[in-house]
Image (cartoon, grey):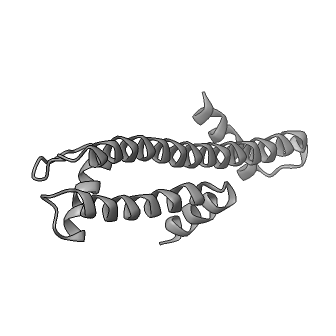
Amino acid sequence: MKKLRILNAVLKKTKADKIVLGFVIFLLVCAFIILLVEPDITRYSDALWYCYAVFSTIGFGDIVATAFITKVLSVLITIYALFATAVVTGVVVSFYNGVVEAQFKESKEAFLDKLQRLPELSQEELEEIANKAKKWK
């Protein structure tokens, strides 16, 4: 749950949440249009199912687009889904790299601080530094 809140905060901070929200709204509108124009789709849930099959690029084949508008919307859904996935993935990876870099920098600064105070350190602290140095090798 905490990770989900962090992801949500990162998406909001980078404004990527607007891309995700826009995609969901676009998907719901496309499903409604598909419901209106596609003769084989008679329920909104089937239209949503078709949109899911398209944006996930699975294409189950249980519903096949026959109307030209549905085919065009299918292409647009796929392109938007790829774009949204790429942006969200990039934002999350960038955030994660920033966190890892900050932790490394903090750890490195603490280590360098201890090295500068080497004569003042206790035997346990010296052993801790030696163990960290062995791990970094």
Percent x, y for residue 73? 35, 47
Q: How many marks?
A: 0
Query: Which one is in front, 23 or 127?
Result: 23
> Residue 42 occupies which quadrant of the picture?
bottom left
Percent x, y for residue 122? 80, 52
Drawn side of residue 73 relative to residue 118, left or right: left
Position of residue 62 relative to residue 109, above or below, is below
Query: Which one is in front, 37 or 97?
Result: 37
Percent x, y for residue 134? 61, 33
Drawn side of residue 115 relative to residue 16, left or right: right
The residue that appears at 75% across and 43% down in the rendered structure is 105
Drawn side of residue 105 relative to residue 46, left or right: right
The residue that appears at 32% across and 48% down in the rendered structure is 55
Drawn side of residue 25 relative to residue 6, left or right: left
Percent x, y for residue 64? 14, 48
The residue that appears at 11% across and 47% down in the rendered structure is 61
Quadrant for the C terminus, please.
Answer: top right
The residue that appears at 62% across and 58% down in the rendered structure is 10
